[in-house]
Amino acid sequence: IENIEDYELEYEVDTEGIIEIDNGIIEAIDFGYTVLTVKLIYGENIKTLLVEVEVLEVSPTKIIAVEKLELVIGQTYQIEYTLQPENASRYVEYLSPNASIVKVDENGLITAISVGTGYITIKSLLNPSVRARIEVKVVKPYIEEIKTQNTLTLGYNKEYQLEWSVLPSEAEQEVIFTSSDERIARVDENGKI
């Protein structure tokens, strides 16, 4: 073809979403296969070229994610990760061999189930040897409030067993009792004054 700049160009693809064309420059936007039809139009003269285009996925060489997490029972966390190279295929699988402690759904949402340490693995589906592992420590909720009597009147050498409760009820139930002045009142580890 002589003087290509004299021709008007029209582009058409048989499968949308694989490539984009701008002023004759082809850009891959997803992996796959398509046939590009290029029409060169000069007046009544039309020439057609068929171009087969295959866009291959880029295999990841590394997955980068947080290495350790601490979650409270019932808490969730959305996994975020990056790939090397940046344009690598984002098709991954999430695995949790310790689902009684921590589970993960197909979208990477972690849920803390019970106290313990579990692991989540992010695995590339294109290159299964490329993985990242997240250690997840699941703990009981933190104590938000301890309920007990605010004041108490006792006679000399009298004893009293404090009654108490911890909120939320799923929190660690270990409470340490102390007296601000042991010359006036002493309290043992069980809350007995």
Image (tube, rainbow, N blue to C red):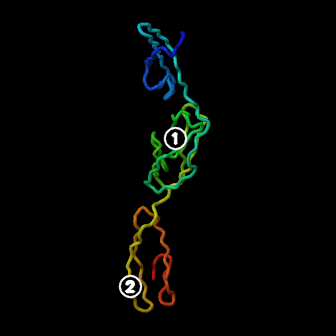
- Residue at 43 percent across and 92 percent down: it is 156
Tell me the crowding category of disc 2: few under 14, some 14 to 19, or many 20 or more residues within 10 angstroms, Cα based. few
- Residue at 49 percent across and 20 percent down: it is 33
Asked whether 170 or 23 is in front, the reply is 23
Q: Mark 1 or mark 2: which comes first in sequence?
A: 1
Q: Which residue is mark 1?
A: 95
Find residue 166 and report its image quarter: bottom left
Q: Is residue 92 above or below residue 148?
A: above
Tag 2: residue type?
Leu
Tag 1: residue type?
Leu
Q: Is residue 140 above or below residue 154?
A: above
- Residue at 55 percent across and 38 percent down: it is 123
Residue 90 image position (x, y, % from top left):
52, 35
User: Foreground mark, 1 or 2?
Assistant: 1
Find residue 59 and report its image quarter: top right
Tell me the crowding category of disc 1: few under 14, some 14 to 19, or many 20 or more residues within 10 angstroms, Cα based. some
Q: Secondary structure at mark 2?
A: loop
Quarter of the rendering occupied by the N terminus? top right
Q: Secondary structure at mark 1?
A: strand
Asked whether 66 or 192 is in front, the reply is 66
Q: Residue farthest to the bottom? A: 156
Instruction: Report the Cα–Cα distance between label 1 and label 2.
Output: 54 Å
Q: Which residue is mark 2?
A: 152
